[in-house]
Image: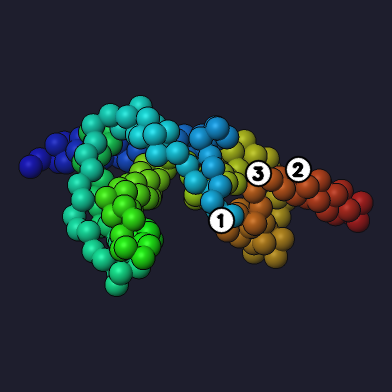
Amino acid sequence: MDNKMQQNQQQDIVQVEGSLRDKHKDISSITTPKPYISQKQGFDYVDEGYMRNQLNKHYPVWGWEIIKYEFIGDKAISVHGRLTIIDNGIQRAYDSVAAHRVATNQKGYVDLGNDMKAANTDCFKVAVNRLCNIADDVYRKQVEDLDLSEGQEQSIKDLLVDYSPDDDLYKKVCQGIKDKSINNKNYDKVIEQLKARTAKVEETK
């Protein structure tokens, strides 16, 4: 394989990775409509039909495979399932496991088939969330974007132009940008503090 072909392949990979990141970020930011959210024992649950609809919308080529059902004593049943999707032309998969309590009465099982379907549904929803970022808000998997824009980062650095890279303030600010303790949420406050610091330095000259 020549260098040009390798470069083209690397560029294609970078492009696909960027598309994947952007797509999953956009889907993760979607707010799940309240009518599709219900509560049970203090926990929020998303309607399976809604999640399936979103899966069809964003990842129309997908498959769900039940790997194994397993009884946990006589109290619960667990399901091991595998969700496979085509994501920007790439096949990806996620295995999930979920358990559901088995309903019983004096005569034995109340409706074992329904318990198995419920365990499968829970397992399916977990896989859809983890692999596809659908309903991240309900599953509390959203990660707030704290990144500074290029313009914001440059504005901060412009206020450090008179400081040496060895200066403690310069180091502190650069480290803050790197570890996100300086971010788009406190950007205005940081700018004000740096301007005030710069003004004091000017006064002493």
On the image, the x and y values in percent for residue 118 come to: 35, 49
The residues tagged by marks 1 and 2 sit, at their Cα atoms, a distance apart of 42 Å
At horizontal 36% and vertical 65% (from top left) the residue drawn is 106
The Cα–Cα distance between marks 3 and 1, rounded to whole angstroms, is 37 Å
How dense is the environment of label 2, judged by Cα within 10 Å: few (below 14), some, or many (20 and up)? few
- Along the line of sight, the residue nearer the viewer: 109 or 45: 109
Element at label 2: helix
Task: Report the disc number at residue 78.
Answer: none
Q: Is residue 173 left or right of residue 50?
A: right
Count residues near mark 3 (Cα–Cα under 10 Å), then give few for <14, some for 14-19, many for 20+.
some
Task: Let me know if residue 69 appears in the view.
Answer: yes
**Residue drawn at (65%, 57%) of the image:** 181
Give the total number of marks visible in the rendering.
3
123 horizontally vs 158: left or right: left
Give residue 162's position: percent from left, percent from top: 72, 50
Task: Please identify, in this view, whether the residue under mark 3 or under mark 1 is nearer the observer.
Answer: 1
Tag nearer the camera, 1 or 2: 1
- At x 75% / y 49%, what residue is drawn? 190
Pointer 2 residue: 188
Among all residues in the image, which is located at the extreme right? 203
Residue under pointer 3 = 184
Q: Which mark is residue 41?
A: 1
Q: Pointers 3 and 2 in contact (CB under 8 A)?
A: no
Tell me which amino acid carries mark 3.
Asn
Residue 20: x percent and y percent?
35, 38
Against 39, residue 102 (above or below) is: below
Circle 2: residue type: Asp
